[in-house]
Each structure stands twice: as C-alpha cells, then as structure tokens.
Image: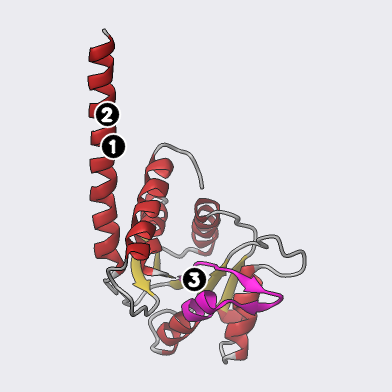
Amino acid sequence: MRRTLAILGTGGAVALLCYLLVISHRIARQSAVDEARPADIIVVLGAAEYNGRPSPVLKARLDHAYELFRRGLAPLVFTTGGAGGDPQYTEGQVGRDYLVARGIASERIVVEGEGDTTVATLLAVSEVMRRMGLRSAILVSDGYHIYRAKSILEHQGMIVYGSPRPHAVRGSWRERWLYFRQALGYLLWRMHIAI
C-alpha cells in the first residue's frame, strides 16, 4: 500500500511539474509578443510607486502605454493598482498623475486604485469596462505578467491584446524563475485561489 501511494505521489508531483513547465513555456512565448492593435482602452497594470513617483518598472509601463495612446490605438487609458502600504498614494493614482503630466487629458484616464492583487485588480477592471460598455483592451505590463493577466481578463469576457513594456534581457535564470512563478500564480487562479 505504501509503495502504491509513493508511486502515485511521485507521479502526481511529476505531472504537476510538467504542467507548470508547459505553462512557463507559454508565458515565455507570450512575453515576447506585442499584439497591440486598436482597442477600446489601454490597461496598465500597476507596480510600485515611491511617495507619489512611479518606480522604474511602473514608469516603463506608463511610458509604453503613453506611446500606444499617442499612436491612436485606444482613446482611453486605465491605470491600476492599490496603495501597496502607502497611506497617501495608490499606484493607479500615481500612474494617472504621471500620464497627465505627459500630456494625456485627465478625462481620457480611468483609475482603479483598490486592487491589491493581480486578480482583484483585473476583476475590478473588467467590471468598470462592462459598465462603460468597453469590450477590448490592450494590456500593458512586464512580459512575464501578460499571459496570466490576459487569461484572467479574457475569462471575464474581454478581448485582450498583450503589449509588454520594452525589456532587453531575455533568457536569464531570473527571468525563467519569473515565468515559473507566474505559472504557479496561473495554476492557483485556475484553482480559484486569488493572488
């Protein structure tokens, strides 16, 4: 009996690892593809902000969204992200302020500032999009984040085009770890565990 359980446990672990490696590969492929095309709105996923200023990662995402907006691919930009421990600012608000300073009219920017996880943020985004009658989005984030975020938004009935921020380093161990971590996040989301 113990041997059977050990074989089943090992088989299950191997199957789980294979699944995560397949998802990691899909994440890696998606991370290098820019699907940007005309859509109803550009959704920028939040990242850290420092006392009202975007972190380098958030700034790169916002700059990419700005270029997509400037190219006329969408009439609206949606900045997202909660406070992340900052009692004064949210990532969504900082993103909005940054884009306004770059010249996008404030009425062209929608803000979601409550989400504290990717899942919570994208559920809020999809609800706001539905209320505004919007169906398609260009999703801007880091490449490793696009696959999972795109899947969540598509699951909510939206048409989503991934557009990762420009990023030069490819194939590093750190990047592979990020793909694997996102695969774990994807698996947990599929199991209805929101992170």
Residue at (25, 21) in percent of width and height: 8
The color scheme shown is secondary structure
Q: What is the quadrant of residue 172 in the picture?
A: bottom left
Q: Which residue is painted at 77% across and 69% down in the image?
A: 88
Q: Amino acid at mark 3?
A: Val
Q: Say if the magenta span includes residue 112.
A: no
The residue range painted magenta reads: 43-62
Determine the secondary structure under disc 2.
helix
Which residue extends farthest top?
A: 1
User: What percent of the width, then of the height, locates residue 129?
Assistant: 50, 62
Per the image, label 1 sits on a secondary structure element best described as helix
**Residue type at mark 2?**
Gly
The answer to whether residue 160 of the structure is visible from this angle is: no
What residue would you read off at disc 1?
A: 16
Labelled pair 1, 2 in contact (Cβ < 8 Å): yes
173, 65: nearer the viewer:
173
Q: Which residue is mark 2?
A: 12
Q: Where residue 24 sits: x, y (%)?
A: 29, 54
The question of residue 53 being in magenta is answered with yes
The x and y percentages for residue 188 are 42, 41
Q: Callout 2: 10 Å neighbours few (<14), some, many (20+)?
A: few
Q: Against 183, is 57 above or below?
A: below
